[in-house]
Image (tube, rainbow, N blue to C red):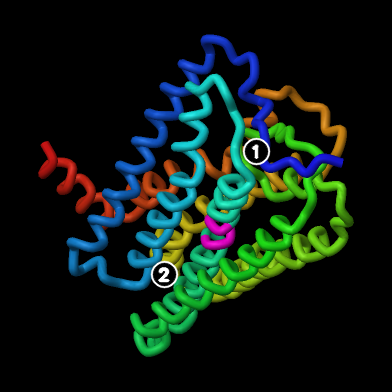
Amino acid sequence: MENYTGFNFMLFENLGYIRYALFSLGFILYISIILFNVLIMLAVLLERTLHQPMYILLSCLSINSLFGTAGFFPRVLTDLLSETHSISREACFSQSFVIFTYIANEFSILMIMAFDRFAAICKPLHYHSIVTLRFLACLIVIHLTFPMILIGVAALLTTKLKMCGNKLFKVYCHSYEVVKLSCDNIIINNAFGLFLLIITTIIPLGLILLSYVKILVICQKSSAQFKGKAFQTCIPHIVVLLNFTIAVTCDVTLSRVVNLQIPIGLSVFLSLEFLIVPPILNPLVYAFNLPDIRKKMISLIKTLK
């Protein structure tokens, strides 16, 4: 059997003139994502009062959003205007690595943010001795590097497979869809993929849930003023977490569940939601809910004018 050296994105076929509308929409969205996330990063960087763990982690979310969308938008925008929609194996595996590293990083950052809120609300007297900037930096490096290594191993396993097909019914390189095109035994790939899902998604979600259960218990025993302040800082995080978790769940479900009968347009949107909605929603959620961030962002926008 032939071992294909590249892949074709089949969903770009026969788009007609609608491709130009999709390109315009995608371009505006990508520019907006860059603008809002850069504003968040600059606000945290330039305002000394924001040099605190919660805001530093928020800027990490923005950096990760720029990282993930850089692996998706330039390629998909190019494909929308191109007559050919092929991608080499190397470029495909690189794109898959970037996108899935973005997912793992997002859950890692959200997990550290949940720990930070737990320490601030449940251990207020010891918060500054627990969450030091050095300790925070170590947490970020460890929890971003380890998943990246695991995803690199998964990508390496995929590169060893012989491909007997080259048609991808996605608009980006999805590692599981690529593995399904192989004519080799993929038991090891599937087992490692499940292990990767547990390590990078299920465990972080479990720890986040545990943190918020403990926060909820503490809030139930506290005053109304304490509850209000706690909810003000926790609600943006919960909104961001729920949105991203639902988006990733949709993508996993669409990839793993066969014969799922839904319209192709809706299927494409649901499979891309984690790359489109969170990067634009996250900075807006935090800007609207955290006055210090909002004031600095408005100040930066006025300066640009």
Say few, some or many: other residues with alpha carbon within 10 Å of mark 2 (under 14 / 14 to 19 / 20 or more).
some
The magenta span reads 101-105
Q: Residue at x 17, y 47 (%)?
A: 300
Q: Which residue is mark 1?
A: 271
- Which quadrant does the C terminus fall into? top left
Label disc, if present, on residue 226 of the rendered structure:
2
Residue sitting at 49 percent across and 36 percent down? 75
Figure check: 299 above or below 200: above
Q: Is residue 217 above or below residue 273?
A: below
Q: Residue furthest front?
A: 2
Q: Can residue 242 be seen here?
A: no
**Residue type at the position of mark 1:** Ser
> In the image shown, does 155 or 277 lie closer to the viewer?
155
> Which residue is at the front of the view, 33 or 190?
190
Rendering coords of residue 13 (x, y %)? 64, 19
- Three-letter amino acid code at disc 2? Phe
* Prevailing secondary structure class for the magenta stretch in the rendered image: helix
Task: Please name the residue shown 68% across and 27% down the image.
Answer: 10
Residue farthest toward the top in the current orientation of the protein: 17
Which label was assigned to residue 37?
none
| Count of marks overlaid on the render | 2
- Image quadrant of residue 227? bottom left
Indicate left or right for 8 with 278 as reference. Answer: right
